[in-house]
Image: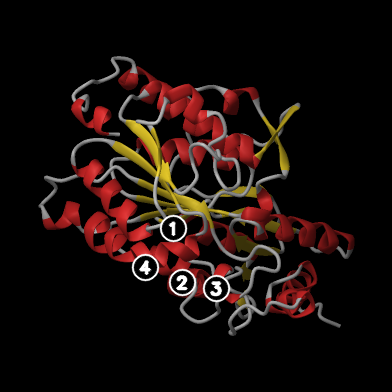
Amino acid sequence: MWGILRQRAVVDGGLSLRRTRSALVSARSYAAGSKEMTVRDALNSAIDEEMSADPKVFVMGEEVGQYQGAYKITKGLLEKYGPERVYDTPITEAGFTGIGVGAAYAGLKPVVEFMTFNFSMQAIDHIINSAAKSNYMSAGQINVPIVFRGPNGAAAGVGAQHSQCYAAWYASVPGLKVLAPYSAEDARGLLKAAIRDPDPVVFLENELLYGESFPISEEALDSSFCLPIGKAKIEREGKDVTIVTFSKMVGFALKAAEKLAEEGISAEVINLRSIRPLDRATINASVRKTSRLVTVEEGFPQHGVCAEICASVVEESFSYLDAPVERIAGADVPMPYAANLERLALPQVEDIVRAAKRACYRSK
């Protein structure tokens, strides 16, 4: 890493051309593709390509090098780029996050991995007070191009201290951008956007999605591919009810939409992708079309992402609503360890179906 600091003035002459191309590519919509890719491989390839394109990008975190990452997201990177760009750290989130922020101050582009975002609590002072606020407090003189990434939210049987969703926590902070991918296309395009962004980005992945495969287009496999930050994706169009969600819950919402279709209810499913900035325009446009809203998240119900979405719709589209908004969230308790209680503490497909039917006055 110190060798990179000495080389921070090195600039890849092809970066400006690559970003011009990526802006054109990102304006298009992708979903179908003959090829498939896991979310794990999508994240790995995105980091690999950005490290190859820009010598200022480096990776740091616990076991990211020799062990190739706790979830193998950084597989092969140490062998390809060496220990000065794939930096194994001690078990000290506060320590290595502070080093990462300092490197970003110096012009590098760190990608900091947390083994789980629950451990980011040890480093939250650096994320918020050092990274998020520096651009504003320096009157725009200091940029902090850093990515904080890792698994977020519930996994399976890991208990209360390893299951929390931090989307609402970090999305409440001015100066941070917060992204939450669902598919392989999301993971690839959003992580590339995060690494290229001049500001700090919190990148919330989901452990249970790492091994899941998704169709991916040839365009999304191009090294210049990049998705715009702050733009949601309509995963499924509908006319009767809008379902807004992010991360793993997008899959649940799509399954719910299929069940609702069997009962004659046409549900529109919106994948937020970006939690901050929030694509209020897409959400409100959909609600003005369907006149009904269901929001879904795994996090706690109080002060959650869904609460902010509901507030936005009430403020901007209240007169278009034909039913009260429906908000589905995790239970307002620390995550239980027992499998049966864990399931009860998290939103399920049937919860989304019931909420949509209530909104459509079809609950009986």
Tell me the distance, in whole angstroms, between the alpha carbons under discs 1 and 4.
11 Å
Give the residue at mark 4: 172
The one of 359 and 89 positioned closer to us in this rendering: 89
Residue 360 visible in the displayed image? no
The one of 65 and 113 positioned closer to us in this rendering: 65
Quadrant where the N terminus is found in the figure: top left
Image mark for residue 308: 2
Give the residue at mark 1: 278
Q: Earlier in the sequence, mark 3 or mark 1?
A: 3
Badge 1 vs badge 4, beta-carbon distance below 8 Å? no
Q: How is the image coloured?
A: secondary structure
- Is label 3 in a helix, a strand or a loop? helix
Q: Amino acid at mark 1?
A: Leu
Q: Earlier in the sequence, mark 1 or mark 4?
A: 4
User: Mark 3 against mark 1, which lies toward the viewer?
Assistant: 3
| x 80%, y 64%: residue | 265
Q: Earlier in the sequence, mark 3 or mark 2?
A: 3
The one of 156 and 267 positioned closer to us in this rendering: 156
Tell me the distance, in whole angstroms, between the alpha carbons under discs 4 and 3.
21 Å
In the image, 253: left or right of 340?
left
Tell me the distance, in whole angstroms, between the alpha carbons under discs 3 and 1.
27 Å
Image mark for residue 161: 3
Badge 2 vs badge 1, beta-carbon distance below 8 Å? yes
